[in-house]
Amino acid sequence: MNRRLIVVAMVVVSFITMAFFARPTVVQASHGITAIVCNSDTHTATLTIHSYAGGLWSNTLYAGSTLVQFMFGSATIGSTFTVSVTSPLFVNGVSAYTTGASYGNASTTCRPGTGNVTSTHFDDGRLNFADAFETSAIYCLGDGSVRVRVPGTPFWYIAFTASPAEIAKVPKHPTTNTLIKSGLGARLYRLMSGELQVNSGHPNGSTSDYVFIFKDCALPAVQ
């Protein structure tokens, strides 16, 4: 009887172990697509990928509304590399674009040769939605606050949120550019011009801060 129980237990453990290792691997997005070129002569799309956080990365490549390929791999932090995919779907005039890259996707239109215009785009509501090498993301919240996030793994971390009251502590036109709030290497300033500016870490290959200038976030209407 004991031997039978041992055999049954071993079978159950083996089944659980096989089920665990059979689970699909979830690849965290740690990269951004900084450029995409689609050559309709060779039916090839070439992606330039920058790894912001290092480790595993993944994204999908489309031609029009059709999925061409799911791509994944591993990269060292700060590296930039290219990946090329050939498909008969990449014909003149079709849109080639990526999804799934948490640090920015890219899109283009397939044309003969390599004279294509590419664009990086974030679709999460950030103000700086088209900067390929941004090192901070700036958002306007519903109450008029400014929220700044910085790259992290697997998501962007909240560096700080500056409320309307905190922003109002600095005059609208100070005599010098004045710091309002900072956190995790990102800084929010009121400029002498009256605009707001966020500075954050150096973009890839640069020795200067990433800078984004914008106007005040809209305050909610008074009821």
Image (cartoon, rainbow, N blue to C red):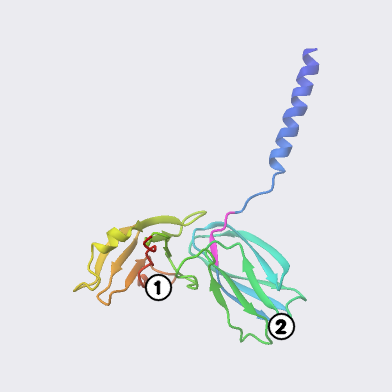
Front residue of 32/73: it is 32
| Badge 1 amino acid | Ser
27 to 93, vertically: above or below: above
Residue drawn at x 76%, y 75% is 89
Q: Is residue 16 above or below residue 132?
A: above
The N terminus sits in image quarter: top right
Indicate yes or no whether the magenta region holds residue 29. yes
Quarter of image, res 111: bottom right
Q: Which mark is residue 40?
A: 2
Mark 2 or mark 1: which comes first in sequence?
2
Q: Looking at the picture, how far across and down is residue 61, in whole percent?
A: 67, 68
Query: If the image is split into quadrants, where does the C terminus sit?
Result: bottom left
Q: Secondary structure at mark 1?
A: loop
Q: Is residue 105 left or right of residue 7?
A: left
Q: Quadrant of residue 168?
A: bottom left
Q: Residue beneath label 1, please?
A: 206
Among the 4 quarters of the image, the one containing residue 180 = bottom left
Point 75% across, 33% down: residue: 15
Across and down, in percent, residue 202 comes to: 38, 68
Residue that protrudes farthest toward the top in the picture: 1
Question: The magenta stretch spans which residues?
Answer: 28-32
Tags 2 and 1 touching, CB below 8 Å: no
Left or right placement of residue 37 versus residue 202 in this view: right
Q: Looking at the picture, which amino acid does disc 2 mark?
A: Ser
How crowded is the residue under tag 1: few (<14 C-alpha within 10 Å), some, or many (20+)?
Answer: few
Instruction: Tell me the SS state at disc 2.
Output: loop
